[in-house]
Image (spheres, rainbow, N blue to C red):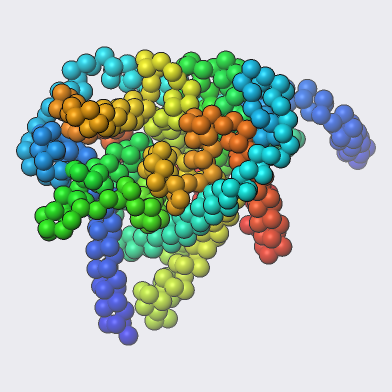
Amino acid sequence: MKVKDAEYAVLFRTLAYSIISFLSLICLFPLLLILSGSFTNNESIFQDGYHIIPKVFGVEGYQTVFRFPSTVITAYGVTIFVTIVGTVVGLFLITMAGYVLQRKDFKYRNTFTFFIYFTTLFQGGLVPWYILLTKHLQLLDTYTVLIFPALMSPFLIILMRTFIKSSIPEEVIESAKMDGANDFMIYYRIILQLALPGMATVGLFLAINYWNDWFLTSLFITSQDKYQLQFFLLDFMNSAAAARDLGAGTGVNLGFDVPIESTKMAMAVVVTGPIIFLYPFVQRFFVKGLTIGAVKG
Amino acid sequence: MSNTSTRENAAVLQDYQLNSKKRGFLFELMKNKILFLMLLPTLIFFFINSYLPMIGIYYAFTKFDFAGGLFGSPFVGLKNFEFLYKSGLLLKLTINTMGYNLVFIFLGNGLAIFCAILLSEVNSKFFKKITQSIMFLPFFISFVILNVINYNMFNYDRGFLNSILEVFNLGPVDVLNTPWVWVILIPIFYLWKTLGYAMVIYLAAISGISEDYYEAAKIDGANIFQRIWNITLPMLKPTFVILLLFALGSIMRGQFELFYQLIGNNGILFSTTDIIDTYVYRSLRVNFDIGMATAAGLYQSVFGFVLIIAVNYIIRKINDDYALF
């Protein structure tokens, strides 16, 4: 019996190692393909297509991206600005809301929680929201519209509330109150210190959401100097496709003036780069925060 | 002496409770005014961003007129809905939206549970860390990158797939113009993007299971498969049910970014890939069909809302602990 169990365990572990390795490779593969494409000579892509190892090495894609660096740098600037402001303001509001909504002596906490939660059950829809922001609030082509709509979500507020509830003992708040601290001081001096891991998780959710956003730009931004990075990439993918189609139609191949293929891939790498660099740090907090907030909630 | 003071205290307390109940909201507002102030920005945010747009639902019943605005547009009753229904669009969009979501829910959770169990039995910490990081990575990457991946995998002239087929002397395939392939490809892209995230949640749940159960089962002679079947899986049930219910609640809402970045405005693929969200977005951005887009959005919200209420009602009957609200 004992031997059999050990045999089963070996079988199972072999299975586990091979399946997980295989799936990890699949997860990595498309990204490696982009990376390889960005380092491939453009004409080689035209002739041989994309491969996992470049047939002819080349960096012309990166050269093109940085030949007119101001456009890329502008998009970077917009994205960094929006990400920092949105994350800081959003985090401030979400932690305050999470703190208030978990206070047991706050009588209407359930009513207000439902007021927030209800917005996930029923919405006005995309179009009325779009018309409100553009026509009535006059937010078309402003930085505000890139930041405001993504400041908070019911999910993040409830995650934060659960986090504060489970990691900060009620007695700590009670004793601070005895000492005469007002509610904001308790939040500022105590909650912000003790809820740091939860704030890291929620802050990263916000930051990644802002960094990866293309939707708000596609709906509301009309001038190119306010494009966010991801939309800049999307726009480049589309306009390159348009240039190629146009070239095919008129018999002129516009594709050779600019090394379109390798530039697309280089652009994708440049846009995603910072996330990959920050990833090891980011991932650790995510796993920790989700473990506490999502499972206990 | 002490007896009377206790009684006095009790009286004061009763009086206080009575008053607080009677004074209600205003009393509470004065007592916790700082807490109210701290919550106020959040309430204003949701009022503007979520509640105000609900007024605009009225557009669904109008033939939208840019000059007229909300109440200047001519009222047409249920005409927009009638068109959506009679053209067969509503049925097609509903089937696509719900169908894909059901596939996402069951494949997504199934594979995540499977992988989490496999990974939890691996003893090499290094292997665990590396593979978990790799599988979680796509979650952090923008959906626009899916557009890029789609392009360099499946582009007819230069895509990786056709380059490989050429090596084996096989003819190229035109994935971007073949509707049925996307029924398989979209779930694969979805799994690629979300598997790592779901796996982290299940791994956390597994790590919360007490080691004692496994020890006891080992002593009783249960092998590893029996331990997983009889301990791990039942212990994961609550996590699965919670995730399932949340997902069922938003079954009418599609993964807009996923579908739009993969399919975009490629009309050839719409028959198998158009969901309500992509239809609404296109109606707004490409066709400028405001009335129709609002109507489709309203249908989505109302139908989704009714479904949530129904699901929640049924859950309450079966097991109160799992109810959403």
Residue B66 in the image: state x and y as whole percent: 61, 20
Q: Residue at x 44, y 52 (%)?
A: B272
Q: Residue at x 62, y 49 (%)?
A: B86
Dividing the picture into quarters, in which one does residue A275 lie?
A: top left
Horizontal side of B39 relative to A256 (left or right) equals right
Q: Residue at x 37, y 27 (%)?
A: A231
- In depth, the one of A60 and B242 nearer the eye is A60
* In the image, residue B143 above or below residue B73: below
Residue A221 in the image: state x and y as whole percent: 45, 20
Farthest residue to the front: give it. A250
* In the image, residue A128 above or below residue A1: above
Horizontal side of A194 relative to B291 (left or right) equals left
- In depth, the one of B262 and B122 nearer the eye is B262
Farthest residue to the left: give it. A56
Residue A226 in the image: state x and y as whole percent: 40, 17
Residue B71 visible here: yes
Residue B112 in the image: state x and y as whole percent: 40, 57
Farthest residue to the bottom: give it. A1
